[in-house]
Amino acid sequence: MPLKAVILIGGPQKGTRFRPLSFEVPKPLFPVAGVPMVQHHIEACAKVPGMKEILLMGFYQPNEALCRFLVSAQQEFKIPIRYLQEYAALGTGGGIYHFRDQILSGGAEAFFVLNADVCSEFPLQEMLEFRQQHGDMHSFVILGTTANRTQALNYGCIVANAGTQEVQHYVEKPSTFVSEIINCGIYLFTPAIFQHIGEVFQRNQQELALEESSNGWQRAEVIRLEQDVFTALAGSGKLYVYKTDGFWSQIKSAGSAIYASRLYLNQYSKSHPERLAQNKPGGPVIRGNVYIHPTASIDSTAVLGPNVSIGEGVTVGAGVRVRESIVLHGASLHDHTCVLNTIVGWDSTIGRWARVEGTPSDPNPNDPYAKIDSETLFRDGRLTPSITILGCSVTIPAEVVILNSIVLPHKELSRSYKNQIIL
């Protein structure tokens, strides 16, 4: 069966919670577990038999980094990958409706739609098999997972028939408890979905004709799959939910990138054991799952892990300790630095004996259904303790402590800081 996949990558106005890291690189290209975030999606799609083409859709200007990534991904996965640029932010449904001819060209009988800011095991093959067993070939499938009762309110909630898994009720971010089954932002559609999105488009146009506002042409195309389409489809016998027990998390804030990195590094032991560093004589001490780029230079007395990824051309000196952190390309950690729960930006330098530490924003480990909370930056007028982020080309002097702070790019610090945003 000819299939396609659409990955929604958003645009520069989005990803604001990802700053200062999204200043340098579009958020979908931010490295998680050593490879760009969206490469995990592409790899999962390329494995599905019958996959003919992968389309990335968003409103980033196609810059050099994006073009380079697309070329290398096509070579690696041997599948056509194209980027379709929206003229404005059209919402999760508006983009695929706008480019429906591109999606349907080549006779695709079904297509996946994946949001780029989730990390998952991507059980795409299982979703296809589920659709064959439940419902008919014209039904649509949402990937769902279980959250706890309080956190479910932050997501799209799905009420399904316990026997058939047909979606009877869908509410996006309800104000009171609806269901603990939440929408994972991964869907399997057939071309019939465009009829339903088209109805929303027409309804939007009619409402705008009554308003007669000046920029109405643009707003009719802004369609949200979740609120506008799923809510209407629920209970019609066409929408089903496939519940996964595999890992899943959103990557909204920089803190959640470290958690996502941990989930992917855990998966590497099965899917890509070659990406995990091993303890070797004369090499650094590795504890737990660690990814080290082949070009990084690491002193044999350094101790890394668990959950560490070291990017291209990074230098790690003697006696350095790194744990639960992402170190991006070109960064340099001088002798005896200690880096915990931190993202070290591109080409940043941390001086000798400095300590850079953040507070992890992990889900509650005692609750199997807990998800990561997308923390607000401030709470009660104070900066919420979170992971420490160093933007690109930040210089930290020797023998200082940086705690729970966010340092914007191109800063040269001269002293210790705690719980601050350093502009």
Image (cartoon, rainbow, N blue to C red):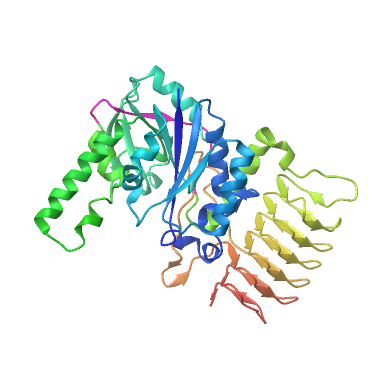
x then y, percent, for residue 300: 86, 55
Residue range (magenta) = 235-250
x then y, percent, for residue 128: 44, 25
Specify the quadrant that holds the N terminus: top left
| Quadrant hosting residue 320 | bottom right
Q: Is 396 placed left or right of 26 in the picture? A: right
Q: Magenta span has 214? A: no
Q: Is 95 placed left or right of 7 in the picture? A: left
Residue 284, placed above or below residue 392: above
Please, which residue is most extreme toward the front here?
106
Residue 139, placed above or below residue 55: above
Please, which residue is most extreme toward the right here?
282
- Residue 41 versus residue 307: which sits nearer the camera? 41
Q: Can residue 403 be seen at all in this image of the molecule?
A: yes
Q: Residue at x 68, y 60 (%)?
A: 329
Q: Residue at x 78, y 62 (%)?
A: 315
x then y, percent, for residue 187: 40, 35
Q: Magenta span has 239? A: yes
Residue 120, placed above or below residue 306: above
